[in-house]
Amino acid sequence: MVGITSFGGYVPRYRLNRMIVFGSMGWLNPVIITNARGEKAVANFDEDAITMAVAAGMDCLRGIDRSGIDAVYFASTTAPYRERQNANIVAGALGAGEQIRTADFSASLKAGTTALLSALEFAAANPGSRAVVCAADCRLGKMASTQEMVFGDGGGAVAVGDDDVIAEYKGCYSVSYDFVDHLRGANTKYDRMWEERWIRDLGYQSFIPEAVNGLCAKYGLSPTDFDKVVYPCYYGGARKKINTMFGEDPSKVQDDMLATVGDTGTAHPLLMLAAALETAQPGQKILLVSFGSGCDAMWFEVTEAIAKMQDGRGVSRWLARRADLDNYQKYLVWRGMAPPELGLRGEVDKETRWSLVWRDRKSILGLWGGKCKACGTQQWPAKRMCVNPDCGAIDQFEPVYLADKGGTIFSYTGDMLAASLNPPAVYGTVSFNGGGRTVLDFTDCTVEDLAVGNPVDFSFRIKFYDPKRDITNYFWKAIPAVEEVK
């Protein structure tokens, strides 16, 4: 039996009330008031599709041995690299091994479910193997556009295999069309869309029913047979019409999170699926549908093992961990839509030393440290000699993945002189749980949120961006420990 073995989600901490956007830009395009309800999730200045995919993957893999991962797939239409496999960065940050299969899926909003289908086929063809699919997007709409109002940032992740399956994969039906509703060329930063009625009437209201009816005809089902229905569609009228396919019970249709997160593109079906699995019951039939250049319709059936994974992972705790971004101009700066003056310190040339990145890739991507086999001392980064002065053993270390271990604050400071897109820059010394200390940046917090001894988690973030060479460099930062929501 092949299917989903775990799930995870990620929603950035900051939320922008859409009325703030309208209040700033409604003078230019008053019609955007029609999408001004609720708020949208906004990635921090040091987040992008890769970091959010890693965050969702970390949520998905909580308590799961990384050494058993055989494949990592990454799906996004906003990946930072066109040549340099983004999935390898995600896999390294998740602590997966290096003798695995990795792949990027892109260029369509249904790339997330396409990656999921590929992962399921990989698991079916290789008994005993496990694959992880991480999807995330950080799409941009121009100022005063519908896209700016609707798009949100976020990630979703699903692990698949044939052991401890929580939702059995039963089958799929796909349709693929060169239907151009949204597009971005290779050199284009902002999303461009065709007329809304075209997207709504010929797109959502045509393709989703075609995919669902095709799945049902293929397996002898009726749309009303499903207990949970997950599909993205941010047009309210179209959504109501599509919902009539699934019967009179509106509770079976998963909330689209448009009012709380926004449309997260490639990640949205997986993010909504993670939310659905948080409350799924054994025996329930789940229908997962994507949209973008066609549709993938997938059928899952929940097993008794679902209870083991309903431990706070998913979406709820990220939705609860929110903070207002009450400044539209800050949003513009964070997304690179308005160039700020960062002073001379912001002009320092930061060239990437790829030989160093390769040599220390385990420490940089996975925050791998070492534990002395002779005395048990843990340290980061891993070195040949034990730092314990009473030990001094050489080459006696076993690797320790520290990224999911957490730590405590040893010291911290706020620096108004350092160049930062969210001053003051906050950094300090963090003690790893289990031993070892290092200096890290803090993010998703203010100085007032911190105190010596408080617990922290580690979050994979953009360390710096080199605009001269178009290189994004990543490392781990500390964030206040995220509260569990059950």
Image (spheres, helix red, strand yellow):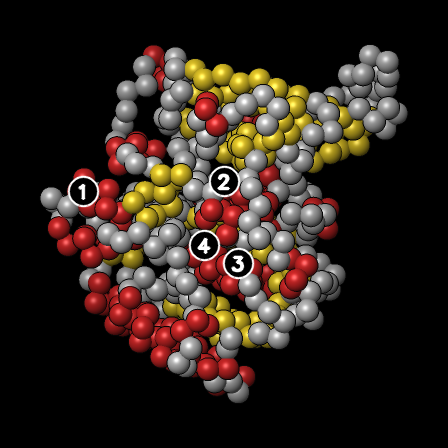
The residue identified by callout 1 is 23
Secondary structure at badge 2 equals helix
**Which residue occupies 39% across, 61% down?**
256
Q: CA gap, disc 3 to disc 2?
A: 18 Å
Percent from the top left, x then y, of residue 90? 56, 43
Is residue 356 or residue 231 the one in the foreground?
Answer: 231
Q: Is residue 13 left or right of residue 68?
A: left
The residue identified by callout 2 is 51
Neighbor class of circle 3 (other Cα within 10 Å; few <14, some 14-19, many 20+) is: many
Secondary structure at badge 1 equals helix
Q: Is residue 267 visible?
A: yes
Q: Which residue type does callout 1 highlight? A: Gly
Asked if marks 1 and 4 touch (Cβ < 8 Å), the reply is no
Is residue 181 or residue 144 the one in the foreground?
Answer: 144
Q: CA gap, disc 2 to disc 4?
A: 13 Å
Q: Is residue 187 left or right of residue 28?
A: right
Of callouts 3 and 1, the N-terminal one? 1
Of callouts 1 and 2, the N-terminal one? 1
Q: Quadrant of residue 343?
A: top left
Asked if marks 3 and 1 touch (Cβ < 8 Å), the reply is no
Q: CA gap, disc 1 to disc 2?
A: 30 Å
Asked if marks 2 and 4 touch (Cβ < 8 Å), the reply is no
Q: CA gap, disc 4 to disc 3?
A: 11 Å
Q: Is residue 167 left or right of residue 467?
A: right
Q: Which residue type does callout 3 highlight? A: Ala
The residue identified by callout 4 is 267
**Which residue occupies 73% across, 51% down?**
68
Q: Nearer the viewer, mark 3 or mark 1?
A: 1
